[in-house]
Image (cartoon, rainbow, N blue to C red):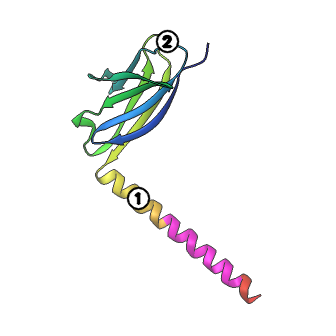
Amino acid sequence: MTETILTPTRFENAIWEGHLTGDSPPQVEALYLGEPLPDVELTPDAAGWVLTVPVPMAALSEGVHCIVIRDQMTGRKLGDFTIIAGSPAADDLRAEVALLRAELDMLKRAFRRSQTS
């Protein structure tokens, strides 16, 4: 018996999709703030099942929101995805860009020093 594996495939128009593989059709639930989300669908395809999770509007607001996907029978976590929006996202991106610029400047100085030596 092989373990059920979840592979994220896309997130578009407030719909998250993933692909599940395993021996038997899994019983899957998606949780947001500890509560199961409605309208989660599992559709068979040639190589497993396509999992469709409609993201609630509350998760598409400012802050960091996490949705956990788990096997209902075993309680085992199969995966998760995070949505970051608003000020926290902007602050994180600015910090990352600033760090990348600092590292690039450091590399440029080191490269220039090696060219003059």
Percent across and percent down for residue 45 are: 44, 25
The residue furthest right is: 117
117 lies above or below 104: below
Three-letter residue code for mark 1: Leu
Quarter of the image for residue 111 reads bottom right
Q: Label 1: few (<14), some or many (≥20) within 10 Å? A: few
Considering the whole magenta stretch, tell me its main secondary structure.
helix
State yes or no: residue 112 in magenta. yes
Percent from the top left, x then y, of residue 56? 25, 33
The residue that label 1 is drawn on is: 93
- Whichever of labels 2 and 1 marks the residue nearer the N terminus, that label is 2
Q: How many marks?
A: 2
Q: Which residues are magenta?
A: 99-113
Q: Secondary structure at mark 2?
A: loop
Question: Which-is-in-front pick, marks 2 and 1?
Answer: 2
Q: Label for residue 74?
A: 2
